[in-house]
Amino acid sequence: MNFGSDNYAGAHSAITASLAKHATGYATPYSTSDLDLAVQRRFSTIFERDVAVFYVATGTASNSLALASFAKPGGIVLAHHEAHIVVDECGAPEYLSNQIRIVPVKGSHGKMDSAHLCKQAKRITGLDVHGGRLNAISVTQPTENGTVYSLEELETIAKIAIDHKVPLHMDGARFANGLVSLGCSPAEMTWKRGVDILSFGGTKNGCWCAEAVVIFDIEKAREFGFIQKRAAQLFSKSRFVSAQFEAYLENDLWIDLARHSNKMAADLADTFSHSLSSRLIRTPQANEVFVILEKNTIALLESNSVVFSIWPASDELEIRDDEQLCRFVTSFETTEDDINRFRSLII
Amino acid sequence: MNFGSDNYAGAHSAITASLAKHATGYATPYSTSDLDLAVQRRFSTIFERDVAVFYVATGTASNSLALASFAKPGGIVLAHHEAHIVVDECGAPEYLSNQIRIVPVKGSHGKMDSAHLCKQAKRITGLDVHGGRLNAISVTQPTENGTVYSLEELETIAKIAIDHKVPLHMDGARFANGLVSLGCSPAEMTWKRGVDILSFGGTKNGCWCAEAVVIFDIEKAREFGFIQKRAAQLFSKSRFVSAQFEAYLENDLWIDLARHSNKMAADLADTFSHSLSSRLIRTPQANEVFVILEKNTIALLESNSVVFSIWPASDELEIRDDEQLCRFVTSFETTEDDINRFRSLII
Amino acid sequence: MNFGSDNYAGAHSAITASLAKHATGYATPYSTSDLDLAVQRRFSTIFERDVAVFYVATGTASNSLALASFAKPGGIVLAHHEAHIVVDECGAPEYLSNQIRIVPVKGSHGKMDSAHLCKQAKRITGLDVHGGRLNAISVTQPTENGTVYSLEELETIAKIAIDHKVPLHMDGARFANGLVSLGCSPAEMTWKRGVDILSFGGTKNGCWCAEAVVIFDIEKAREFGFIQKRAAQLFSKSRFVSAQFEAYLENDLWIDLARHSNKMAADLADTFSHSLSSRLIRTPQANEVFVILEKNTIALLESNSVVFSIWPASDELEIRDDEQLCRFVTSFETTEDDINRFRSLII
Amino acid sequence: MNFGSDNYAGAHSAITASLAKHATGYATPYSTSDLDLAVQRRFSTIFERDVAVFYVATGTASNSLALASFAKPGGIVLAHHEAHIVVDECGAPEYLSNQIRIVPVKGSHGKMDSAHLCKQAKRITGLDVHGGRLNAISVTQPTENGTVYSLEELETIAKIAIDHKVPLHMDGARFANGLVSLGCSPAEMTWKRGVDILSFGGTKNGCWCAEAVVIFDIEKAREFGFIQKRAAQLFSKSRFVSAQFEAYLENDLWIDLARHSNKMAADLADTFSHSLSSRLIRTPQANEVFVILEKNTIALLESNSVVFSIWPASDELEIRDDEQLCRFVTSFETTEDDINRFRSLII
């Protein structure tokens, strides 16, 4: 059983088949082939408006270049203090976006507290160059804590961005998992709520390497090609990404895979809730389960080759010396049998 | 017939099969899986010494991060004035390597003139901060003009790097084509000649997306992981690259594919040499053919759906008004039938 | 009466005289003149060891290039959350030092809490590239809150830096004020405590524009010339800074000026402590006084042309709606008469 | 006799007196004092339109931030191959302006050949991201070779910039020397010819440290404050620069000083033209004299403590083995007596 991360899984068979299907013949490179253009149109269909789509190598690249596309001298981006761009990207967003700085916003369960966000935004007036100026707000959906912002919560954050005349970025590394959780359309979770630019991730949900920056106002996408190439993120054989996305977006495969992994996470959480040696932090809303386990339970699981992560606990959590916070991630590869076998181990 | 570029081709069937083979099951991400480690060992075998290997998204990334790994404040890299890092990477090497500058070196047929290289290197003494200081020399093998440095020529350049105590980088976007052309081993064309760091390209020779930075002194590879992640070039599902390289390096597939495309280029050049409406610039040594064509020949080819590129001519070339310089690139997909059909068009 | 900031004052007459004295005749530029070298030796005498000294334009430049001289890819600098490099430099340290990030450390009265510093340092293990790695610790002496670290406190911080094998930087924009406050020698407050690199400020204490980066291990200063020039911080007529420092360091002028301004701050604080409409936050240890004033007192002062700053209050401070936090800064120009007149206004 | 560079001289007595005059009393910092504002207005008067003026520390900073203010991803600046920004600034323009690259333009006597400039501009179409895009043209007036572009020559260059819709930057490190040479007004040599942004240097012409970026369209100056602060180039006690400029611009002092140094250069050139052991490269148009001297003449001068520079010769110059190219620079400090004594040495 492997709950290490959704990037421990490989690629879905439909993705693999699509790569084989499109491997032969010639195609123009650099996102100009017929397949590339067809997939770009598909994105527009899915988002119910003309969008600009750019493929990049990693989720970190997606976030970094998205923020770069808006970056201003002295610019500050506000994001949750546990956001991927804050703690997991080795400074790439700052490096690749010409020195924006990311100032952390507080908030429980991985979500920015809107009052604190508002306060932080107001502090950065930009009237005085010394303090810098607000440049963008970045929201992660679903969050790094496995929670999902409601549409109302997204709208509240978007309003703050609008009030300060700055763009709103969404880190959607697990976009499909959030979408399934809310049961809404891609448009409803993004531009209809005020999102200007999206990191759309496919890798964690069954692709090999399929990450895209989606810009909702195509007029604002004109500079992006230069930003992408300057960052060495312009694939030559771009159809290898398009082939993945074609299969991914076909017949709602992406939705089905995300629904499956969310369901597996819910089942896993349910299992924990029946175990005396575990304390579930919260009901998962996507495909990540955070739970406090007794150390001997951890040892038991490890001795049974269950893969998962010990997770750094925030200061607020009360964790006993014989416990540790753990993270379990499900994916399209997780099976009901995995869950059943897991249940038999801890209950 | 498509001679547009070797990145117009897709992926070789063995590459596709390997991706399918490795798609299932779990594997640790970020270049730590068993397959990743096996492929890294394979690189060491091929290069006859322990090497450090890092996958990146593009050839531009490979060059940029290779140069970044040595970059110093005020650093200057010397490279041929038509090198890919000079004219085709939108400033990525400078951007991603913390502001090295690339100063062009003259030389005919895409090769640096060693006397001019020597002179340029001596000018940048570094005794005075204003002028900056020599940081590295970068050589492209094969060159952008389809020529291949001999081992002696490489050694001459390496000696200049050694004399100035700076590293030598090799842009090997078409590494296999150069290797086949010289008929030597990978070690002989690289570290045995004085190359310190290599951009090893697989994409143009039958892979989907397989580019690696190879560092020959593993002691000098310690910082690279941070440079790679900071540039958003660390793949999570790294086995998708390893799967490509596994097949690519298996049973000399890479050598066979390069030998084939070089042969096709030679045949194409031979064809041009028998045409009255074309003037071959030089005998190709790898898989690129540069030829001056009469404009009505160009029109004829285009009307027959032959894909190739009109190429910017350097000032030295004498080109009549009714002619244009053209580039034809062959690949693993090029067939003898393509060449035969092409011959029937122009002779 | 002007308590706006110590940069509202001009230059001490001895500084002006020295500029006039050295204005005539020829001198080699770029910190190579006889006067430049003499002043550099003077710094070595003052610090009781051979030090390397580099002039830069601003305190922000001094901090930024000091941090740049140690910067590594993925590097993180720990500093107090109210440090100048965090809130007042528009991202210059990050921009000019090749993308270090500054992670804030908590602590009251402007001083880093050593337990929290230790915890933050331990979190950044660098074992995993995603999280980055600890690159340096930066301490401000005196702090932005007008407090001064004791030698023991500095040593505790230095020990954490040593334990993690990272350099310790000191922002000494008001270095002399801290020195006078502790009554120790420059060596005792810096390298004898473990400081590796110092931003030595003269501007706020009677110079026009005299800021220097002091590197205590001259072996580590070799790259700095390139860092300085690359950042456009290498003055041509460097003797104009040397002339200022010559007078500044002559006959302990710098110490006398700092002693005076500290004394004026103490007197001002004493004045506030006798006023019913003011609540002194803390006894000043240098030349900055932080006090909560009633709004009508603020109005009274402003109507009498007293210049000072309304200051952003941290969340911990309890401030009534009819109050505001204020900052008063004294300088070499502040006179006892200023204090007396001020006293007559508020008591 | 010192002809080392115009930065070997100190400051003119009027500059020193102005610093003394403005040293006392309080003034708001960061270019907001009454004196600062008065000097800014003075610049507008001199340039016959409202201009935005920003002080920076060095000429290199001035050029770098001027180019930064227009910089775009993938941007390329065209400049003469011997321009200061190309050979003498250690990469600062690239570093501080977010990765513009500078592509050299050929031309004799330090001036860009307009035909080659035009050709280079046309090559960078920007239609394809790989090659980058034209971002600005930079012209040095007077040039590094002591020549001065005529108004017609400036207009020709400006027209190329306008045709390509990019801004024109002028490096005016020795602006006054060029102005005196042409005998025109500051407006005529800048915005009336199409210059958008100017590096206005005072340091080499009698100031200590007085460099300003002048932006002719104040609407385009809005971002500059952030660019300046982020680069650590915002002086706190800005009046120390204003005090210099006040005296510098008063009663045409700057013009008189430049006229004097140009006259001294002309006299020096005249002297060389009468010497059998020297070959004047060209008649100086500003305050720099380039001459080929026999090595025994060089030795004679050095034994008489004459300070000047051996200069790197371009490939076109024919220089015998017993000769070297030399540069002599005059300044406001150069006297007729210097020239007379020099004449007695070499004739």
Image: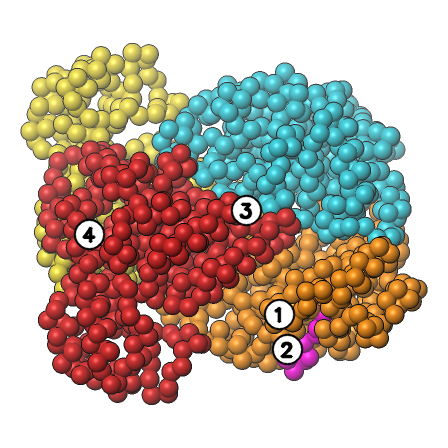
Chain colours: A red, B yellow, C orange, D cyan
Do labels 3 and 1 touch, CB within 8 Å? no
Q: Chain of mark 4?
A: A
Q: Which residue is mark 2?
A: C154
From where the camera sits, is residue C72 visible? Answer: no
The residue positioned 28% from the left and 56% from the top of the image is: A182
The residue positioned 27% from the left and 63% from the top of the image is: A286
Q: Which residue is mark 1?
A: C139
Do labels 3 and 2 touch, CB within 8 Å? no
Judged left or right of residue D144, residue B191 is left
Question: Can you tell which quarter of the image residue C49 is in?
Answer: bottom right
Q: Which residue is mark 3?
A: A73
Label 1's element?
strand
Amino acid type at circle 1 is: Val
Q: Is C155 in front, or is D146?
A: C155
The residue positioned 51% from the left and 36% from the top of the image is: D102
Tag nearer the camera, 4 or 1:
4
Q: Is A10 in front, or is C87?
A: C87
How far apart are labels 3 and 2 at the CA level? Answer: 34 Å
**Image coordinates for residue A158, horizontal then vertical, percent:** 43, 50
Q: Chain of mark 3?
A: A
Q: Residues within 10 Å of mark 2 (few under 14, many from 20)?
A: many
